[in-house]
Image (tube, grey):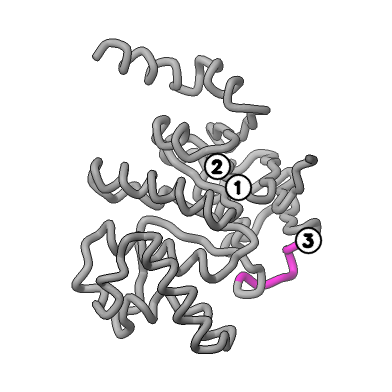
Amino acid sequence: MDRVPRSRVKELAIAFGTVEVLRGVSLVVYSCETLVVLGGSGCGKTTLLKVMAGLQPVDAGTVYLDEVELQAIPPQQRRVVYLDQEALLFEHLTVFENVAFSLRLRRVPTDQVKEQVDELLDAIGLSDHAAKRSWQLSGGQKQRIAFARAILAQPRVLLLDEPFGSLDARTRAEMQQLYQRLAARYRFTALLVTHDVREALVLGDRFAVMSSGELHCYENRAAFVADETTGVQEEIAFWKQI
């Protein structure tokens, strides 16, 4: 079956003063996949996501969603959700109502709201916390709620900016496993950026590497792993020594 392009960017270019942040960046995100962009701090990963979300103008290039140009479409109408390390939950709402927020905006019937939210809270293991407020949650629990809320917003694309980067190692590993389960269950489309090679390998269906504002996309996992510049071989060698 042919892959269906969901989001596409073509020849994006941005300069802040004399610094070229994005230099002719092009990519395609296919429906129901996670494309992981790997790169170090300051390479342009976050800027790329903000452009796709409509939060950052460009000097040149085009962003498409389902083959529709997005330049003239404001962020709130793009059906794209941008999520970073800050959960940004509504403190005055319970866990249940935080997750239900987008459903309430769409005026989904109350019985369907309860059904969908209960199902997702069960999927992320927080059913017993539905009545709590954000200040009663751990960092990992807050991130689960933010992720669940993003899924129920039914975005065409999830833009994930190192969403687990602020968590401790154990919680981060748990969130990666949860991500895998939810991706298989809800079949969402995502572009996720990270600087962590292991996280890229765990979460990605396809891979790209960004360096100094330039992006290189790999055809498949084998090509990504085989490229000695990605850091994968060093990661493999480290674990072989243990």
Res 69 label: 3
Question: Which residue is drawn at the image coordinates 25% and 59% (left, top)?
Answer: 139
Q: Is residue 116 magenta?
A: no
Q: Sequence-wise, which precedes: disc 3 or disc 2?
A: 2
The residue at 55%/17% (across/down) is 227
Residue, disc 2: 19
User: Horizontal and vertical percent for residue 109?
Assistant: 55, 88
Amino acid type for the residue under numbered disc 2:
Val
Q: Do the residues labelled 3 and 2 touch (CB within 8 Å)?
A: no
Q: Disc 2 on helix, strand or loop?
A: strand
* Residue at figure coordinates x 55%, y 32% from the top left: 209
Q: Name which residue type carries label 1.
A: Ala
Quadrant position of residue 95? bottom left
State the separation of the CA atoms marked 3 and 2: 26 Å
The circle drawn on residue 32 is: none
Q: Mark 1 points at which residue?
A: 15
**Which residue type carries mark 3?**
Glu
For the residues labelled 1 and 2, say whether their Cβ atoms are less than 8 Å apart. yes
- The stretch of residues the image draws in magenta is 68-75
Image quadrant where one finds the N terminus: top right
In x, y percent, where is residue 87? Answer: 35, 64
Mark 3, mark 2: which one is toward the viewer? 3
**Rendering quarter of residue 92:** bottom left
Q: Whole-percent x and y of residue 205?
A: 57, 37
Earlier-in-chain disc, 1 versus 3: 1
Q: How far apart are marks 1 and 2 (CA)?
A: 5 Å
Residue 128 lies left or right of residue 110; in this view the side is: left
